Amino acid sequence: MLLACISPLMAQDFKFDPAKGKAIPTYIAQITVMKGKVQKMSKGSTSDVQPGERFNKGDSIITNEKSFVKLLVVDDTILSLGPKSEINFEDFDFTEKTDRKIVYNFIKGQLTGHVKNKAKENDIVVKTKMASMGIRGTQILVNHESRGKVDISEFALLTGSAEVVDGKSTKYPLKKGDRVVFVQDNTNNKGASEQGSIPRERFNELNREDIDEEKDFRPFMKYFEPTDVAAESAIQPFFHSEPEFVSEVTAERSANSGAKKTDEKPGLKQNLKKLNEKLREYQKHK
């Protein structure tokens, strides 16, 4: 009787639960805010979308350059995707907002998420090619990118706590302000990780309290730069043979390296010098 009052278009996104006497959504999320060109990949076909578009299990969302999208998940979780990003709704089982199982396969780009209703352990998972984060109720930041032969995944928390697990089942517990970075060389499948904290100034910028999450986009975590870690870091050697990692931002840092910075980490100047030497060698033989 309830579904008879719902339009045929809406009815396909809900199922009636006689035991609970209510309609339960069968879709996972819908777009609330977007900018630029955003696409939906569903059952092998790709189409442009508009605000209000809904996504089901198996669907993917793809943002183009200079595009952004905000999604409201049926459990009240808010997800935002940055430019040139892609996420797949790999698995979904929903009974109610506090009883659900969702797996987000984050393929590339920048992601922020606010899981408002706490979940049971491993009921909500965000995974990349290299690791997965089990979420109960927190604000998350995730980046994943490939540069040259190296893949990089970053996980960080603005609030709450979570646990990240890599491909070898090593666990990395995170709390407010923590982040962990994974790198992997795809030519030999060797990898490394580094766990630490988001710099205080950057954390305050990311965790601003004046953001209206229903309307505004929370800032995305900046992509990893090889100069973000000290020369003795376990992940730093992965970039010495990859001069394409020396971005325009890093080049600017090099040009201004004479200016003393209070937040420089030990070994940063020496490491930057090595990176630039590699870049010059690379360009010479290119």
Image (spheres, rainbow, N blue to C red):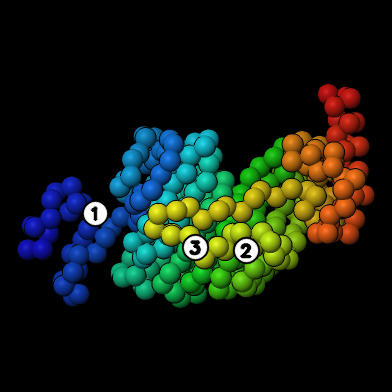
**Quadrant location of residue 46?**
top left
Mark 3 or mark 1, earlier in chain: 1
Q: Residue at x 46, y 66 (%)?
A: 115
- Asked if disc 3 and disc 1 are in contact, CB closer than 8 Å, the reply is no
Mark 2 or mark 1, earlier in chain: 1
Mark 2 or mark 3, earlier in chain: 2
Give SS at disc 3: loop
Crowd class of label 3 (few under 14; some 14 to 19; many from 20; radius 10 Å): few
**Quadrant location of residue 229?**
bottom right
Give SS at disc 2: helix
Q: Residue at x 12, y 55 (%)?
A: 6
- Asked if disc 2 and disc 3 are in contact, CB closer than 8 Å, the reply is no
Q: Look at mark 3 in the image and give the residue it sits on.
A: 210
Q: Which residue is drawn at 90% across and 55% down?
A: 267
x then y, percent, for residue 202:
66, 59
x then y, percent, for residue 222:
64, 50
Give SS at disc 1: loop
Instruction: Identify the amino acid type marked 3.
Output: Asp
Instruction: Identify the amino acid type marked 2.
Output: Asn
Q: Which circle, 2 or 3, is nearer the viewer?
A: 3
Quadrant in the picture for the N terminus: bottom left
Image check: 239 left or right of 90?
right
Image check: 40 left or right of 233?
left
Residue 204's disc number: 2
Instruction: Identify the amino acid type marked 1.
Output: Asp
Could you give the CA–CA distance between mark 3 and mark 1, rounded to whole angstroms?
Answer: 34 Å
Quadrant in the picture for the C terminus: top right
Which of the two residues, 153 or 188, is positioned nearer the viewer here? 153
Residue 180's disc number: none
Q: Residue at x 56, y 49 (%)?
A: 110
Could you give the CA–CA distance between mark 2 and mark 3, rounded to whole angstroms?
Answer: 11 Å
Q: Look at mark 1 in the image and give the residue it sits on.
A: 13
